[in-house]
């Protein structure tokens, strides 16, 4: 069965393209190429799939929402808008980033059409469903002084380890898919903007441009645009099919296969811990998250050594030292590798990790990680530097050189000082 992607042509500033049906393309071919390009090209998929984070689920949600909306436009199945609203609402509980996608798509429909979609009661039903599902998050943010805005401000000002200068937003897009296959998503973007065959989906191109402007102005991270790549690669796959039909199928197919294979290799090197840590400098420069987990086992062993020393002085009193870290990454390292070393769970006042609450209000020593001298003096007593964090690969990440201190006790109970230990960024 053959499917058409042709619609009545309209006046356009872009050059006309040949009709897809004239080339004898099939939906199956486009799907196969799209899958190959997606698996071989998306660095960001490997990154988010390797490290469990909110982005892991956010990328899936963007892909599902854009797929359902594209299908609603193509087939006229308006109830798909409601399903997209359900998925968007759940995604908003995970991370509010998809709200910008919805705004961009709305502006795209208004500017480029098809505007009839804006008159669909199912579209507005889906939007209402999304807001209703999102409402607990909104209520919590409102009752806690909108901490998300403070985190966003900190990110825009470079307060996150993965923050980048605003001018890098567009250059980084060439890395998120992989430099080898960047021409595919670029061709997809151009086709969505110019090709009359894809005119009903032109709003995706407008949405991409709107998101670029929003994230440039707000100081968003480069990967915030990653959720649009499935759309761009899908449109680009159609252009790849056209390219394959215009010459030697064997030669061009071989070149495409080589590009996909090379892209997969480049993507794996950039996104995954394949290279020895001591040789990962260039990779860390492109993907700082790769470097942030280097040295975690060694770091946790250092914490365990300090913990064992401190525990000896408290064993007769039936107490155990508290481990308090300056950020959730350090706390995550302790919780990941600490149990086999006999360490208890770590505490941190950083971002959402602080919601786990303070340690129990009881006297005893505290092992602090990454706190400055002023923070120690403000909240703790009897502190002394025991060691500093290092890693055998000598990789310069956020933890290298940070202090591990041993303090005799806190200045007041944990519940009293906890608000002063909480911070966002």
Image: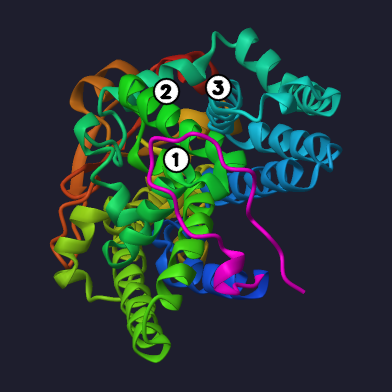
Of tags 1 and 2, the one toward the viewer is 1
Determine which of the numbered discs, if any, sits on residue 193 in the image.
1
* Direction from residue 388 to residue 222 in the image, left or right: right
Residue 358: x percent and y percent? Answer: 54, 28
Q: What's the residue at 16%, 59% (across, down)?
A: 395
Determine which of the numbered discs, if any, sits on residue 151 in the image.
2
Q: Quadrant of the N terminus?
A: bottom right
Residue 375, located in which quarter of the rendered image? top left
* Direction from residue 212 to residue 318 in the image, left or right: right
Tell me the crowding category of disc 3: few under 14, some 14 to 19, or many 20 or more residues within 10 angstroms, Cα based.
some
Tell me the crowding category of disc 1: few under 14, some 14 to 19, or many 20 or more residues within 10 angstroms, Cα based.
many
Above or below: residue 397 compared with residue 49: above
Q: What's the residue at 52%, 45% (across, down)?
A: 196
* Direction from residue 312 to residue 133 in the image, left or right: right
Q: Quadrant of the C terminus?
A: top left
Q: Earlier in the sequence, mark 3 or mark 2?
A: 3
Residues rendered magenta in the picture: 1-26
Tell me the crowding category of disc 2: few under 14, some 14 to 19, or many 20 or more residues within 10 angstroms, Cα based.
some
Residue 299 in view, yes or no: yes
Name the residue tied to disc 3. Answer: 107
Q: CA–CA distance between discs 1 and 2?
A: 34 Å
Q: Earlier in the sequence, mark 1 or mark 2?
A: 2
Q: Nearer the viewer, residue 157 or 245?
A: 245
């Amino acid at each position: 069965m053959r499917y058409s992607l042709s619609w009545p042509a309209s006046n356009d500033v872009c050059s006309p393209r040949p009709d897809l049906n004239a080339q004898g393309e099939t939906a199956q071919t486009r799907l196969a190429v799209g899958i190959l390009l997606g698996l071989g090209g998306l660095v960001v998929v490997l990154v988010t799939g390797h490290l469990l984070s909110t982005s892991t689920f956010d990328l899936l949600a963007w892909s599902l929402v854009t797929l359902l909306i594209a299908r609603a436009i193509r087939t006229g199945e308006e109830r798909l808008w409601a399903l997209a609203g359900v998925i968007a609402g759940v995604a908003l509980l995970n991370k509010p980033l998809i709200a910008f996608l919805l705004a961009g798509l709305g502006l795209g429909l208004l500017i480029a059409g098809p505007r009839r979609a804006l008159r669909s009661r199912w579209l507005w039903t889906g939007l209402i469903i999304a807001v209703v599902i999102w409402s607990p998050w909104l209520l919590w943010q409102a009752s806690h002084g909108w901490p998300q805005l403070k985190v966003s401000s900190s990110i825009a000002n470079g307060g996150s380890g993965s923050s980048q200068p605003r001018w890098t937003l567009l250059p980084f897009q060439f890395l998120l898919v992989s430099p080898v296959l960047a021409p595919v998503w670029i061709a997809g973007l151009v086709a969505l903007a110019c090709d009359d065959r894809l005119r009903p989906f032109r709003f995706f191109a407008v949405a991409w441009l709107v998101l670029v402007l929003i994230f440039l102005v707000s100081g968003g991270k480069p990967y915030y645009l990653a959720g649009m790549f499935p759309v761009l690669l899908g449109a680009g796959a159609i252009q790849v099919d056209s390219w394959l039909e215009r010459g030697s199928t064997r030669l061009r197919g071989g070149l495409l296969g080589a590009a996909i294979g090379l892209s997969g290799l480049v993507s794996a090197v950039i996104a995954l811990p394949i290279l020895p840590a001591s040789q990962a400098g260039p990779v860390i420069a492109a993907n700082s998250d790769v470097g942030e987990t280097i040295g975690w086992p060694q770091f946790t062993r250092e914490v365990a050594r300090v913990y064992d020393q401190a525990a000896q002085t408290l064993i007769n009193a039936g107490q155990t030292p508290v481990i308090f870290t300056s950020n959730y990454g350090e706390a995550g390292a302790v919780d990941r590798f600490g149990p086999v070393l006999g360490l208890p769970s770590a505490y941190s006042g950083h971002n959402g990790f602080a919601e786990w609450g303070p340690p129990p209000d009881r006297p005893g020593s505290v092992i602090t990680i990454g706190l400055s001298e002023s923070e120690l003096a403000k909240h703790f007593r009897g502190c002394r530097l025991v060691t500093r964090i290092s890693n055998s690969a000598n990789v310069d990440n956020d933890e290298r050189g940070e202090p591990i201190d041993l303090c005799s006790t806190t200045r007041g109970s944990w519940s009293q000082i906890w608000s002063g230990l909480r911070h966002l960024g």
